[in-house]
Amino acid sequence: GWQEVRLDIDPEVRPDIVASITDLGPVPAGSCDAIWCSHNLEHLCAHEVPRALAEFRRVLNPSGFALIRSPDLAAVCAILLERGPDAVVYRSPAGPVTAIDMLYGHSASIARGNAYMRHGTGFTRDRLDRLCREAGFASVLTGCTESLEVWAAAFMPRADEGRIAGALRAAGLRLTEAAGEPA
């Protein structure tokens, strides 16, 4: 029952809407049930993240939620210290991804001219949780995965947090409150 509307700053990927997540002006206030933000926030500068999260809140309806994932800065730093910056962490369709790529953006893509792949900030579980709360989300569940990602589900005031968290758990994603209590 979902209607997907793809938004991207890069017109080359042919989104439905070309815009920055820091200015969702083309998207009407309260018009979205959910936002899927997968590996986008880290491409902003740190000072832009609160603006993007405020825009997420603006376009979500009162029962909506945002599901956010980003590289886990703490896990990436551990790999960097243990194996070095040039250690290949995994292979993606774009090629090998090293620890330094996870910190600063995929070097090969950037070298080919895709400046949108640069990273301007990073997230730990605590930082992503805090920024979502500071943006005014009613509640936030967070977690880290073995695939070196930090996740957040940020809920609007009337969101059915229990149902959404249950669906995420059923899909294998276990998110918890900041205090560490299971959702």
Image (tube, rainbow, N blue to C red):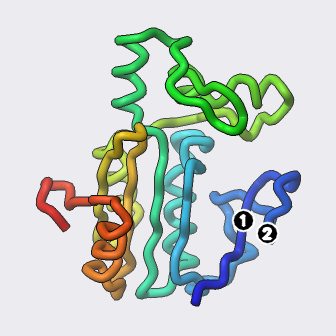
Q: In this view, does 32 lie above or below 43?
A: below
* Crowd tier of the residue under label 2, counting other residues whose Cα lies within 10 Å: few below 14, some 14–19, many 20 or above: some
The location of residue 12, given as percent across then percent down, is 87, 52
Asked whether 94 or 16 is in front, the reply is 94
Please provide percent x and percent y for residue 109: 76, 30
Q: Which amino acid does label 2 sit on?
A: Ile
Residue 17: assigned label: 2
* Residue topped by disc 1: 7
- Inter-mark Cα distance, 1 to 2: 5 Å
* Quarter location, residue 82: top left
**SS for tag 2?**
strand
Residue 138 image position (x, y, % from top left): 31, 74
Going from N to C along the chain, the mark reached first, 1 or 2, is: 1
Left or right, residue 134 beside residue 4: left
Nearer the observer, 148 or 70: 148
Question: Is 3 left, or right, of 35 in this rendering?
Answer: right
Relative to 176, residue 147 above or below:
above
Nearest the viewer among 18 and 15 is 15
Could you tell me which residue is drawn at 49 percent across and 55 percent down?
50
In the displayed structure, 174 sits above or below 59; it is above
Residue type at mark 1 is Leu
Q: In this view, does 57 lie to the left or right of 110?
A: left
Q: Tell me the residue at 70%/75% (across/down).
A: 5
Q: Is residue 110 above or below residue 1?
A: above
Q: Circle 1 — which element? A: strand
> Where residue 36 sits in the image (x, y, percent)?
55, 65
Q: Do the residues labelled 1 and 2 touch (CB within 8 Å)?
A: yes
Question: In the rendered image, which quarter is residue 64 located in?
Answer: bottom left
